[in-house]
Image: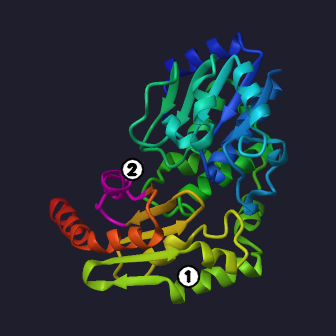
Amino acid sequence: MVDVSDLVEFQRHLDGAHHIAITSHRSPDADAVGTSLALARYLRSTGKEVTCLLPDAPDEALDWMTGVNDIVLFDRDPGQAQEALHRADVLFALDYNGMGRLGPMKDAAESATGTWLMVDHHMGPEDFPTARVHDARCSSTAELLWGVIAGLGGKEAVDATTAGLLYAGMMTDTGSFRFNSVSAETHRVVAAMMDQGLNHTAVHEAIFGEQPMDRMKLHAFAVVERMEVYPEFQTAFVHLTAEDMERFHYRPGYTEGLVNKALGVSGVKVAVFAKQSSDRVKMSFRSVGQFSVRDFAEKHFDGGGHHNAAGGASKESIGVVMARLRGLLPEIAAGITAAEEADA
C-alpha cells in the first residue's frame, strides 16, 4: 500500500525542512485529527517544528486526544493559521485529496509556497502535491500513515499514545472494522500497534463510551421524528433542521453515527443523513453492496468519498434538499437493482 519510491521523495523533502504544517479537512473526523496529531508527534521526535491546522474544530468526542488543544483553527485564528501555512517548508495534506475540502482555509492553503505532500485514501486525488502516498483501497488514512511512519524508519517512535491516535482513525473509518475496506493488512497494523502498547479498549471507550444526554436525546428525536424509510426503494433518509439542533443544544460531533442508524433499518441498502448549517446543508451517504454512493453524491450534490461512504453538500435549504432526495428515490432503486444484477 505504501510505495517505497514515494517515501524516498517524502524523506528528501523532510530532510531539508525546518517548519512543517499539517493540514486536514473541514469538519474533521477521528481519521483527520488522529493522523494529524500522530504525524506531528513523529515529526517532532525527529527534531522538526510542527504546526497542526484545521479549518474548524473537531467534535467533543475527540477532546481526549493528546495535542488536540494545540491545533490551530482557521475559523478562530486565521492570522495565526496563515502565518504557519506561509512559513512552512513542507505542508502535509492528510485525509483529503482536493483543496476544496479545506472550506474557508482553501485560499490561504493555496497561497502557501512550501512543498505539498499528501497521505490519503479517497478516490480521485487532485495533482497539487509534489509527492503522495495514496491508496483508495485502504481502510483509512491512519492505516496508510502507519506505513509511512514505519517506512521512514519511525516505527519505534510510535508509542502507546501515537498508536491510540492512529487506532482511533482506523476504528471509526471502518465502522469498528466491519466495512469491506478492512483487509488482512488492516488487522496486521492493529496487531503491530498493540505490540507498541496500544490500549484499544481505552480508545473505543473514549469515543463511544459516555455520551452527553443532549446528544442521546437528539439521536432519539432524529430516529423517531426525522427518519423517513422507503422500503420499496430500499432507502432511508434522516434530516435535522437548524431549529432541531438548537433545541438539543447541538455541539460538533452530536450527529455522528445517525446515517448508520438509518442504514441499519431492515431492508435498507442506501441511507442519507442531511443537516442544516449556517451556510449549507451537509450530507452523509452510506450504502451496503455494490451501489456507489460516491458516484451518486458526486453527480447530484458536488460530493465524493468512497464506494459505500461519501459526503456532499448543497447551498439550497434543507426543505429543498429533502425534496430533491425524495425525487431521486427511483434513480437510487434502479441503481441498486443494476448494481446487484451486474454483481450476480
Q: Position of residue 333 (x, y in %)?
A: 23, 72
Label 2 near label 1: C-beta < 8 Å? no
The structure residue drawn at horizontal position 40% and vertical position 67%, both measured from the top left corner, is 321
Q: Check disc 2 and give the amino acid type.
A: Asp
Tell which of 306 and 276 is nearer to you.
Answer: 276
Residue under label 2: 302
The structure residue drawn at horizontal position 70% and vertical position 71%, both measured from the top left corner, is 250
Q: Which residues are magenta?
A: 288-309
Residue 80 bears which disc, if any?
Answer: none
Q: Check disc 1 and give the amino acid type.
A: Ala
Residue 203 visible to an observer of this rendering: yes
Q: Position of residue 319 (x, y in %)?
A: 43, 73
Q: Quadrant of residue 55?
A: top right
The structure residue drawn at horizontal position 56% and vertical position 15%, both measured from the top left corner, is 9
Q: Position of residue 247 (x, y in %)?
A: 68, 81
As measured in the structure, the alpha-carbon distance from the residue carrying label 1 to the one carrying label 2 is 25 Å
Residue under label 1: 222
